[in-house]
Amino acid sequence: MEKAKKKILIIIGIILIVIAVLAYILSLNNDNEEDVPINPNNPDIDDDVFRDDIALLEDEAVYFGVQKIINDYYNAIFNEDTSKILEMLDPIYKEENMIQANNLYSFIQNVGIANYLAYEIYYNPNSSVTYYFVDGSLSGNSVMGDDYTFFLDVQFVIIVDNDYHYVLKPIKTDNIFSFAQDYEMTERKLDSDLTFEGVSVSVQSKLSNYMAIFVNFLIDNPSEAYKLLSSSFKKHYGSEKKFIDESFQLYEKISSKIFSYSSESSGEENIYTIIDDKQNKWIIHENRVMDFDISIEVN
């Protein structure tokens, strides 16, 4: 019985990884296939201006550009591209931890074919050097599909200098906003050839990301999936416990693949009506990128 249950979880893990990877690929290739260069700093300020006030990142192209950097990092880990990983890591972080090629893999974990989804990004606006504080989740699967992993609250700092060069470092915190507020940000000139670029993402690709996040949570963390529900959909279940008890049944009935969608705006809110390929109706209310809730009418 235990072996059968483990086999089912492995199959589910493979399916979720495929969904997440497809959503990520779509986010890079749908509609607008070319990356859009984005100046993450304010082009009107002097090179020597630096401020450490903190704000929530709302620019979608920059947001998905930041997310892509982290996915590139995990892709380099999967391919064991030691030189690329070392190039991406912050020199100060490497020096503090005495990281070199011969001990690099004792500091990082290869989770296989991985996909990172950013949930919140804070940054210091109007500055000549930008620090991005990123909180998200990581899902990964071995090549053979026998070792599925899911990590919530995986965080990074990404630093972009005035020439748009960047480096990153992993961090660990229970509160990304407080961490950003307390972080000692300094003027940096990075010795890096890596260049930050924003990513133009179609509406459909963004919605695919949202739906993939919800589907991932249904299996791995139903409590987090419950938090994404609209107030009306929560009332449909009556309690979080009932939703969690029925989360697997909901997972079996819905799909994160979009058959069609329409959109409308109400004030500052975007409302998306989506039909998945199992003909279920999703309603997604979005206040800003990654700030959304979901309700579903199951067919």
Image (spheres, rainbow, N blue to C red):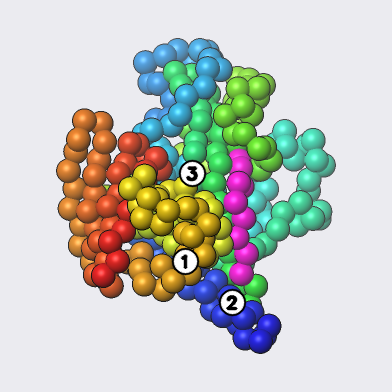
**Start and end of the magenta stretch?**
148-156
- Spatial CA distance of label 2 from label 1 is 20 Å
Check whether the beta carbons of the residues at disc 1 and disc 3 lie within 8 A of each other.
Answer: no
Residue where numbered disc 2 is placed: 10
In the picture, the disc for residue 119 is: 3
Residue where numbered disc 1 is placed: 246
Report the amino acid beneath label 3: Tyr
Please tell me whether the stretch drawn in magenta is mainly helix, strand or loop.
strand
- Give the crowd class for mark 2: few <14, some 14-19, many >=20 residues within 10 Å: some
Q: Is residue 60 left or right of residue 299?
A: right
- The quarter holding residue 74 reads bottom right
Mark closer to the chain start, 2 or 1: 2
* The C terminus - image quarter: bottom left
In the picture, the disc for residue 105 is: none
- Give the crowd class for mark 3: few <14, some 14-19, many >=20 residues within 10 Å: some
- Spatial CA distance of label 1 from label 3 is 25 Å
Residue 6 seen anywhere in this rendered image of the structure: yes
**Residue 96 sits above or below residue 12 on the image:** above
Dot 2: element: helix
- Spatial CA distance of label 2 from label 3 is 25 Å
Q: Which residue is painted at 21% across and 30% down in the image?
A: 267
